[in-house]
Image: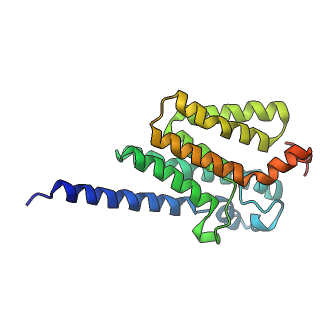
Amino acid sequence: MLDSPDHFHSNTDVRTTLYILASYFIGSLSAAILICRALGKGDPRQVGSGNPGATNVLRAFGKLPAVLTLVGDVGKGFVPVWLATALNLPVYAIAGAGLSAFLGHLYPIFFAFRGGKGVATLIGVLGGYDWRLGLAFIVTWLVVAAVTRYSSLAALVATALSPIIALVLGLPLPLCGAVIAMVAAVFWRHRANIQRLLAGTEGRIGKPG
């Protein structure tokens, strides 16, 4: 007997839910911690700013661990979205996969929910949603960073512009909604940086502090 339409949709919903959950677990794989362990370095959460991200890894352990961390963090945002698209999952599943991977990076279940600030993983998710959106983020970051020498300000400006660019590109509403949610989370995670920027005490690129 053929499955009923309701049964088919039920199975699809279950698979979609499991895929989104799996994306969270992928996002929870902290590239900074795993790579620094593999290279015999220390725990990035115990040095510098305590943030398990590429910038802190660069300052504490050098270029190679930082580059590998950046690639890992971008990749774990991009791959779940790319695969969901390749599998022709519904657009809400694609949006959910990206958002879930992003939240996994911020609050990784494998590392006591102590994650990074989300910028690199956000780039990966945005690039998965639409390569032009990811490219626009990178170009904006480079321009603002070159002019101001503030990495955090460049990230915040590029992040803030992402929903506008997504709308201009005509991305489906579920994707735009996920972008807005991630933007809010990035700003929340950067609240200390925002305070230092306003106070004029934020460290500039190429300078300690």
Q: How many marks?
A: 0
Percent coordinates x, y for residue 109 in the rendering? 58, 69
Percent coordinates x, y for residue 24 in the rendering? 51, 60
For the residue pair 138 and 174, the one nearer the viewer reads as 174
For the residue pair 12 and 142, the one nearer the viewer reads as 12
Please tell me which residue is depicted at 62% across the width and 31% down the height of the picture: 136
For the residue pair 47 and 9, the one nearer the viewer reads as 9
Please tell me which residue is depicted at 37% across the width and 56% down the height of the picture: 16
For the residue pair 56 and 10, the one nearer the viewer reads as 10
- Vertical position of residue 18 compared to residue 150: above or below: below
Please tell me which residue is depicted at 57% across the width and 54% down the height of the picture: 102
- Vertical position of residue 64 compared to residue 46: above or below: above
**Residue at the top extreme?**
168
Q: Is residue 194 left or right of residue 160?
A: right
Please tell me which residue is depicted at 75% across the width and 60% down the height of the picture: 51
Of the 4 image quadrants, the one containing the N terminus is: bottom left
- Vertical position of residue 86 compared to residue 29: above or below: above
